[in-house]
Amino acid sequence: MTNTQVTHVQIDNYGPWTVTPEPRREVDLQTLQSRLYADLSQLIGNRGGYVFFSRFDNMIAVTNGLDEDDHALVQESVGNRYPVTMSLSVATGTTPAEALGTATEALQEAGSAQDKSRREILRGRTIDEEFRTEEDLQIAHFDVNDATGKYTDQLNEFDTFIRIEQGYAELMRYMRRAYDSLSFFVGGDNVIAVCSGMDPAEYQDAVDHVRDAVDVELKVGVGRGRVAQDAGMAAKHALEECRATGDDVHVDWATGEADPSA
């Protein structure tokens, strides 16, 4: 079991803004979205969290260690830099999907994403310091086996992209359905998943499922920690062990315990 804190980030009234007073150039919208994501990645990353771009007008952050004041400062910083505002909803849960579901429901209750009167909502709850542990988060870093040799150096870039996206899409669906976990493409051939309290056999099951379903072979390193960046770095080191040994799955528990589900 994990203790995940998730923040749902949503740009306020973004759809209508993009066409008011007339449709804005797509290049300008793409630039705004990418810069906002980069700023949020830094603002939340400097506090130990992770941000995933999702659909860009909506983003998902893993914010263990950030309290309400931290969220308010992030929100204020964005409001001072951009022509749009954003609303934040924070929730906790024993699985990432549970936490995100609660956060999203609270944001929806505050008003529609295209409600002109809904601005800079900040609501929800964070994990009190006394309830935080070094085992709160479990993060997995998936990587496609020999993506360069099989795809990048063999196929044209678009066909390579299709193959990588097929693997990501199947992994994303399966991890959500089978394990209440959230998986995000982070570039190249890499996927980071924020996971429930999965054991090594369950990670092997996910790898096997993607291989059987779409013929994309994965390996995965898994770590856990008090904040997302601690768990993520442990996962990166575990992934390097996979590369060295040829194993599909390697776990690196910060506490030294063999099985987080025990």
Image: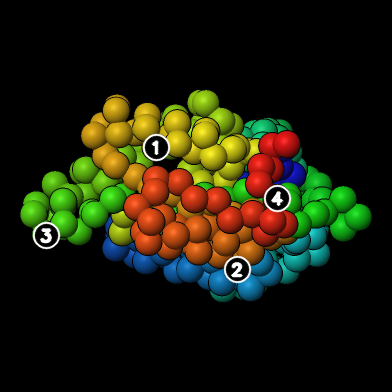
Label 4 environment density (alpha carbons within 10 Å; few <14, some 14–19, many ≥20): few
Query: Disc 2 marks which residue?
Result: 45
Element at label 4: loop
CB atoms at circles 2 and 3 under 8 Å apart? no
Instruction: Provide the residue designation for mark 4.
Output: 257
Q: Amino acid at mark 3?
A: Asp
For marks 3 and 1, the one nearer the N-term is: 3
Q: Name the residue type under label 4.
A: Glu
Image spot of residue 231 (x, y percent): 61, 58
> Which is nearer the eye, 39 or 94?
94
What residue is shown with label 1? 207
Q: Where is residue 191? Give x, y as percent.
A: 41, 50
Find residue 133 and report its horizontal and vertical position in percent. Answer: 80, 54
Tell me the CA gap for discs 2 and 3: 33 Å
Quarter of the figure with the C terminus: top right
Of the numbered discs 2 and 3, the one sitting upstream in the chain is 2
The nearer-to-camera label among 4 and 2 is 4
Determine crowd level at label 1: few under 14, some 14-19, many 20+ residues with C-alpha closer than 10 A: many
Q: Nearer the viewer, mark 2 or mark 3?
A: 3
Disc 3 marks which residue? 153
User: What secondary structure is found at the residue carrying circle 1?
Assistant: helix
Question: At 28% across and 50% down in the image, what residue appears?
Answer: 145
Query: Do labels 3 and 4 touch, CB within 8 Å?
Result: no
**64 relative position to 52: left or right:** right
- Which mark is first along the chain, 2 or 4? 2
Labels 1 & 2 near each other (Cβ < 8 A): no
Q: Is residue 41 above or below residue 216?
A: below
Please tell me whether mark 3 sits on a helix, a strand or a loop: loop
The N terminus sits in image quarter: top right
